[in-house]
Every structure is written in C-alpha cells, then in structure tokens.
Amino acid sequence: MSAPLILALLWLIAANVLAILPSQDGHRLRAVCLIAVGVPLLGLVTWQHGPLIGLALLAAGASVLRWPLLFLGRWLSRQMQ
C-alpha cells in the first residue's frame, strides 16, 4: 500500500475515535479539522490510485462526516429557494 492510502485509513480511524469522544461544541471543530485534512488526502489518493478507490474513500469519509454533509445540503437547498 502507498503512503497516501495508509494515511487515509489512519484518517478514518482517527475520525471514528474522535466521534466517540465527548465534545463541548457538538464536534464542529473536529469536523472542520477532519474535512481540512481529508479533502487534500482524498485528492492525493484519487490521483495515485484512480477514481474507484477515491470514490470508495469518499463514501467512507461521508459516512463518518454525515452531519456536516446533511447541514451543507440543507443550506444549499435554502439558498436555491
């Protein structure tokens, strides 16, 4: 396995561990940090391993960060109306 793929898997483990721990702000800061680190990492993995692996990691990351994605979808739907 390549280094970006190992880092992506470590990112998934860290995201799951951070989701278990209690938080004062509803995990907002953690989600922002995970997104800031995860997006470039996802791009690098997709570039090196192709779009199928990239889509699989995107789905795994979206399952971990589902609430920020839900809030983004709601915000976008309000902006469209």
Image (spheres, grey):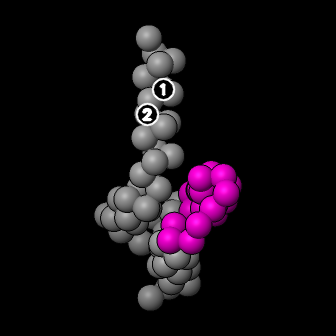
Q: Assess whether residue 25 is covered by the magenta stretch.
A: yes
Q: Residue drawn at (55%, 84%), measured in percent from left and top?
A: 3
Judge left or right: residue 11 versus residue 24: left
Q: Residue drawn at (66%, 52%), measured in percent from left and top?
A: 25
Mark 2 and mark 1: span between their CA atoms? 5 Å
Judge left or right: residue 56 versus residue 4: left
Residue 5 to residue 81: above or below:
below
- In the rendered structure, which amino acid carries the disc numbered 2? Gly
Answer with the quarter of the image where residue 36 lies.
bottom right
Q: Secondary structure at mark 2?
A: helix
Main SS of the magenta part reads helix
- In the rendered structure, which amino acid carries the disc numbered 1? Leu
Q: Please give the residue where the numbered disc 1 appears in the rendered image.
A: 76
Across and down, in percent, residue 14 comes to: 55, 76
Residue 45 to residue 67: above or below:
below
Residue 2's mark? none
Q: Is residue 15 visible?
A: no
Q: Are marks 2 and 1 in contact (CB under 8 Å)?
A: yes
Instruction: Identify which residue, 2 or 81, lies in the foreground.
Output: 81
Across and down, in percent, residue 40 comes to: 60, 60
Q: Secondary structure at mark 1?
A: helix
Judge left or right: residue 81 versus residue 18: left
Q: Residue furthest bottom?
A: 1
Disc 2 crowd rating (10 Å Cα; few below 14, some 14-19, many 20+) is: few
Q: Residue drawn at (43%, 22%), measured in percent from left and top?
A: 77
Q: Please give the residue where the numbered disc 2 appears in the rendered image.
A: 73
Magenta-colored span = 19-39
Across and down, in percent, residue 65 comes to: 47, 56
Query: Where is the N terminus found, in terms of image quarters?
Result: bottom left
Q: Residue drawn at (37%, 59%), measured in percent from left and top?
A: 63
Instruction: Identify which residue, 12 or 1, lies in the foreground.
Output: 12
Number of labels in the image equals 2
